[in-house]
Amino acid sequence: MQDDPNISKRRDPSPRRVTAQDVAKEAGVSRSAVSRAFTPGASLDAEKRNTILAAAFKLGYRPNALAAGLSGGRSHLVAIFVGDMRNAYDSEVVAQLVGRLNALGKWPILIDGGGRKARDALLGEVFRYPLDALIMRAGSMEPLIAEQCAKLNIPVICSGRIIEADQVDNVCCRNLEGSASAARLLIDRGRHRIAHIRGPESYGASDEREAGMRKALAQAGLAPVAVAQGTYTVESGYQAARDLFGRHEIDALHCANDAMAIGALGYLRECGVDVPGAVSVTGFDDIAMAAWPGIRLTTVQNPIGAAVSHIVDLLERRLSDPQKPSEVAWVETQLVLRDTH
Amino acid sequence: MQDDPNISKRRDPSPRRVTAQDVAKEAGVSRSAVSRAFTPGASLDAEKRNTILAAAFKLGYRPNALAAGLSGGRSHLVAIFVGDMRNAYDSEVVAQLVGRLNALGKWPILIDGGGRKARDALLGEVFRYPLDALIMRAGSMEPLIAEQCAKLNIPVICSGRIIEADQVDNVCCRNLEGSASAARLLIDRGRHRIAHIRGPESYGASDEREAGMRKALAQAGLAPVAVAQGTYTVESGYQAARDLFGRHEIDALHCANDAMAIGALGYLRECGVDVPGAVSVTGFDDIAMAAWPGIRLTTVQNPIGAAVSHIVDLLERRLSDPQKPSEVAWVETQLVLRDTH
DNA sequence: CCGGTAGGTGAACACGTGTGCAGAGCGGCG
DNA sequence: CGCCGCTCTGCACACGTGTTCACCTACCGG
């Protein structure tokens, strides 16, 4: 009587994962039957299925998703590439996106593009996984990545910048119109000496938001008193406000995002400037902090829920029909009136 | 002469991914050679390796990580389970963790435990992937999950709550000492009517932070004037402050996290209360917003960088020695003095 | 010149799953 | 009874990789 090889393996320091074969042996059926027991549409005797499921539960078996994804099926892995996770807006998008993808049975692999140098290497590595799709939160991202995805046959959904290419769908916010509506609000409040803090040049949204503001001013026969440039961070908004108010007479300030507006607001409060009595301040995005007591920023809502819904919708449609033509889903903005205008 | 089956496949609506076999044919070598060309230690003629790499680049080939992970090797997938991504502290932890894991060649799969009902189902599904590890940001998470991981032989690294089990390492903050130091600061400033906003009961940290505060007060012969309960959100801090200050005479308020402190601060400023002249406010965590101009919250730093470093360190050590005994890495707090004490 | 060694190379296998295919059993109908 | 069709089931293959094993060549020392 020989030793059962299973026993010796049981003593292995790193025990194998339970496989369908193990369940088959436990339940006294073929391995195929086990596979079918976990496949909804398969034809299998009901009683046998119950026996198998019981054995599987007892052993703690779960079908190996890697092996399943290997042959034919999808991997259900979706990469989310985000420019900078420290950005509050991007962070909220990711938070919502993760929840929605989870509910859809997709598993988001997160990649932080913060360190620019490692970016290409990172993507090269993650492309070793057969991803169902890549979701790009693209501020300053080059279309080169989309090109690489096309070569690998990975659909791309891009938000924050429009990339025109096959298998690339886009979600984009009405930056120009949104910014214009904020500027018109300031003009309606009787402001005439309006300044702007814009974002860095590498972001397409920066240009659009500045253009929208200039357009609305021009329609009222005005021009911005001054335009400073920030980096979409609170600190940069603080600095830019100090520069602007030190050198110009200003009665209203429109910022390209909420973070910079909050920074500017902080500076003005430190100086004892009455907001909105003496100076109006508006932002863009409507991040969660804009509604906080003590801030209550009047801003242009760039609705995250809508953007995420569009992304998920485009993803589903693209997966069900990989050959469908590219689309651009627009996200409409809306003024949110709080206490700073 | 028959049709080349490859040509008909080329016309397939969803073209296959490029495989090592394709590269082998292109370079005129065996498939094994291709595999070796991508394996650092393998013995392969240098010239041949170059030929293969060139062919691989031309075809856009990347080794399929799923197939590689299937046989023996690690999958390099790490799940991050986070209680609630909308929480600013958790969100910052995730942001830093993602960057560190990426640099390590690990790919974080994010799971948002926000919706409590779907939680178990979610985990059941993600465990179909042979994860290298599970990182749990556990506020109110049951140890049941760790048990499940043990069954599947997946190491767990838990932060925010200590779980004693094999293959589970913990990272934990000195909640009691940190909270006590904040309370002592308030006492040193001459405050005697001190209140507290604590977190929900399901979080272990809530109890520890309240206990630390009570202990420091007791050592000075004091007791809290009142203790309210919030949910770690800004809004709940605002509400709790309104309740407390409506019913009690209070000259200092210590909150179990920064978000609630910011909410309370907002309420006090709305009421025109002088902070820190009439009332001192302290928080816990030192999230990014605590340093924002216009907030400048005095708080107990719960250093995210240190926690993340511990997590990554424990992960690496656990992977290199799966049998090593469990550990608890402690994160030390530090008072950050700003403008609200 | 011969044996030994070292390094290069291809065939074959393992990994764990889903599924096509063919066969088996069985009930219904002519 | 014979045939058809339906459901259930097991075998075998495909998926793409890393790795082991045996084999071959070239080189070097004796």
Image (spheres, coloured by chain):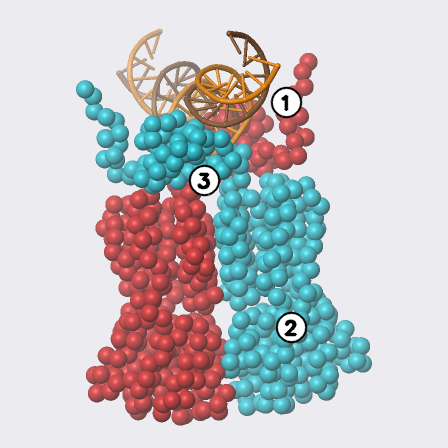
Chain colours: A cyan, B red, C orange, D brown
Whole-angstrom CA distance, mark 1 to mark 3, is: 30 Å
Chain assignment, label 2: A
Q: Looking at the picture, how far across and down is residue B55, in whole percent?
A: 58, 32
Instruction: Give amino acid for label 3.
Output: Ala
Quarter occupied by residue A11 = top left
Instruction: Give amino acid for label 1.
Output: Pro
In this view, A93 is above or below A247 = above
Q: Is residue B188 left or right of residue A125?
A: left
Do circles 3 and 2 both sit on a common chain?
yes
Q: Quadrant of the N terminus of chain B?
A: top right
Q: Residues within 10 Å of mark 2 (few under 14, many from 20)?
A: many
Instruction: Give amino acid for label 2.
Output: Val
Q: Which residue is mark 3?
A: A65
Q: Which residue is mark 1?
A: B5
Element type at marker 1?
helix
Whole-angstrom CA distance, mark 2 to mark 1, is: 57 Å
User: Would you say the residues marked 3 and 2 are in contact, meaning their CB atoms lie under 8 Å apart?
Assistant: no
Q: Which residue is mark 2?
A: A300
Q: Looking at the picture, how far across and down is residue A129, in whole percent?
A: 50, 42
Q: Residues within 10 Å of mark 3 (few under 14, many from 20)?
A: many
- For the question of whether residue A243 can be seen, the reply is no
Element type at marker 3?
helix
